Image (cartoon, grey):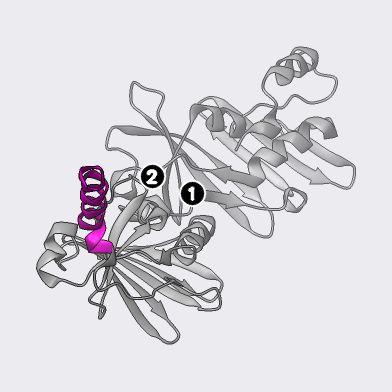
């Protein structure tokens, strides 16, 4: 008889351990969001902070209580995919007295998904036995679920997390003229029937090699920030060092700022202020030498080390 005691005790312990998952368990296996359901907005509430992601046609916007910004659509799509892959298949408890234990009592983080069919609220709670698992509860549903919570990790903590960092995006072939000034250095180049030409300070016109221009235009056509300065403006001690004016379907004017006594750079345009790397700055404010100039060959040698087409 004794040989049966230990197995019975072990089985009893297993039942006790998994009791929250199997007592009163419902047959559940459904996704948090179905593929065909269209999401129009997502609201994230964390403490007193409220961030809203909203669709306007084919464009996504992100906003808080103060401002609205264009969102990075690739990050939105990644979040939506993570929500759609979340399966409700591990009910833990329906005991309301245990909600606080799992962090889903209603006083913590909350997500609201707005669909064509209505709104779906989700209380997000504590981490589960593994870091990738999280406890959640749907608003209007008494059940606490243990799910793979990848979508929770992708939620924005601030509007800047999902803001579009694109400063300028153009077809390189649409650019017809470029002018820039950085301190004592300048460049003015224009596309003519004869090809691209550089115009010097005295108005003299000289041709420039097409291969060199094409790499430079690629850098100009896609300018991406590394982040955003506080209050959406360059720091108070930043100095305006120049500007770049690009003519395509219209004229785009972007101003350059540098933090005093440092190598932190910022660009501004009517859409806002952006932080950029030194690498990006050097790619935009790059001197091109006209064909036949004495400095042409050394310039080409330097270009092999810093390919302008690699700047973003």
- Report the number of numbered marks: 2
> Hey, which quadrant is residue 102 in on the image?
bottom left
Task: Examine the structure image and report whether residue 122 is included in the region drawn in magenta.
Answer: no
Q: Position of residue 7 (x, y in %)?
A: 27, 47
Q: Which residues are magenta?
A: 1-21
Q: Position of residue 223 (x, y in %)?
A: 58, 44
* CA–CA distance in space, label 1 to label 2: 8 Å
The residue lying toward the viewer, choosing from 52 and 13, is: 13
Which of the pair 20/104 is nearer the observer?
20
Label 1 CA crowd tier, 10 Å (few <14, some 14–19, many 20+): many
| Residue 72: mark in rendering | none
Q: Is residue 120 left or right of residue 278?
A: left
Tell me if residue 116 comes above or below residue 128 in the rendering: below
| Residue that carries the numbered disc 2 in the rendered image | 228
Say if mark 1 contacts mark 2, CB within 8 Å: yes
Work out which residue is located at the far front of the displayed protein and give it. 1
**Does residue 13 appear anywhere in the picture?**
yes
Left or right of residue 99, residue 280 in this image: right
Which residue is identified by label 1? Answer: 165
Name which residue lies at 16% across and 68% down: 106
Is tag 1's residue or tag 2's residue first in the polypeptide sequence? 1
């Amino acid at each position: 008889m004794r040989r049966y005691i230990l197995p019975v005790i072990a089985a009893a312990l297993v039942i006790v351990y998994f009791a929250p998952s199997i007592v009163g368990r419902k047959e559940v296996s459904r996704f948090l969001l179905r593929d065909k359901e269209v999401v129009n907005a997502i609201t994230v509430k964390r403490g007193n902070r409220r961030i809203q992601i909203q669709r306007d046609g084919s464009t996504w916007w992100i906003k808080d209580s103060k401002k609205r910004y264009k969102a990075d659509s690739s990050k939105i799509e990644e979040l939506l995919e993570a929500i759609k892959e979340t399966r409700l298949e591990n009910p833990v408890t329906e005991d309301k007295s245990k909600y606080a234990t799992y962090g889903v009592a209603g006083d913590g983080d909350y997500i609201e998904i707005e669909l064509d069919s209505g709104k779906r609220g989700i209380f997000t709670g504590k981490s589960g036995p593994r870091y990738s698992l999280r406890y959640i509860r749907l608003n209007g549903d008494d059940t606490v679920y243990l799910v793979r919570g990848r979508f929770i990790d992708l939620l924005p903590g601030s509007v800047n997390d999902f803001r579009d960092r694109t400063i300028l995006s153009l077809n390189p072939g649409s650019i017809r003229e470029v002018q820039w000034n950085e301190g004592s250095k300048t460049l003015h180049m224009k596309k003519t029937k004869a090809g691209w030409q550089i115009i010097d300070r005295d108005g003299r016109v000289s041709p420039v090699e097409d291969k060199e221009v094409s790499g430079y235009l690629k850098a100009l056509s896609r300018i991406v920030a590394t982040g955003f300065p506080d209050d959406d403006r360059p720091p108070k001690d930043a100095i305006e060092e120049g500007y770049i004016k690009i003519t395509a379907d219209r004229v785009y004017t972007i101003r350059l700022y540098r933090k005093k006594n440092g190598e932190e750079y910022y660009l501004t345009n009517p859409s806002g202020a952006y932080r950029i790397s030194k690498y990006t700055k050097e790619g935009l404010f790059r001197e091109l030498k006209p064909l036949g100039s004495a400095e042409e060959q050394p310039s080409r040698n330097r270009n092999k080390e810093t390919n302008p087409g690699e700047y973003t």
